[in-house]
Amino acid sequence: MKGQSMNPQPKTKIIRLKGKPYKDLQRRVMERDNWTCQICGEHTEAPPHHIIYRSEGGSDCGPNMCAVCDECHRIIHHGHFLELVPRMLMGNKGKKIVQHILTGILCIK
């Protein structure tokens, strides 16, 4: 079939929230993560990070968001992932963090 993929991927609806529903989601994510950066373990009040960036089609939903401090967030968005390793070891967050990071890296085009 011309122009069609042999194995079409199911389309998932992208969730976009605004205003109070978005603020409520951010608060729930931060509470779920105990206001703790999921990379280094430091206390944070920075807005949650989208694991799959919104610009890459990531949704505004709890499973796609996690608490990340300003410094770890900066490192992620500048693509310096190796800088996160010592921060992860200091924070001793282990498997959950690696899963979040790898999910984000694999979804970045």
Image: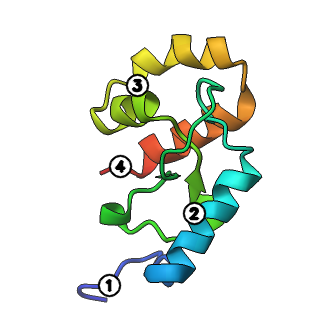
Mark 2 or mark 1, earlier in chain: 1
Q: Crowdedness of circle 1 by 10 Å Cα count: few (<14), some, many (20+)?
A: few
Residue shown at 67% from the left, 19% from the top: 91
Amino acid bearing label 3? Phe
Q: Residue at x 66, y 37 (%)?
A: 36
* x and y, in percent, of residue 75 in the image: 36, 28
Q: Could you give the CA–CA distance between mark 3 and mark 1, rounded to whole angstroms?
A: 35 Å
| Badge nearest the viewer, 2 or 4 | 2
Residue at 59% over, 42% down = 100
Mark 1 or mark 4: which is in front? 4
Marked residue nearer the N-terminal end (3 or 1): 1
Between the C-alphas of marks 3 and 4, the distance is: 13 Å
Which residue bears the numbered disc 4? 108
Circle 2/circle 3 CB separation < 8 Å: no
Relative to 75, does residue 58 appear above or below in the rendering? below
Q: Which residue is mark 1?
A: 4
Q: Amino acid at mark 1?
A: Gln
Instruction: Tell me, yes or no, if residue 2 can be seen here.
Output: yes
Residue at the disc numbered 2: 26
Q: Of the numbered discs in the image, which one, if any, rests on residue 81?
A: 3
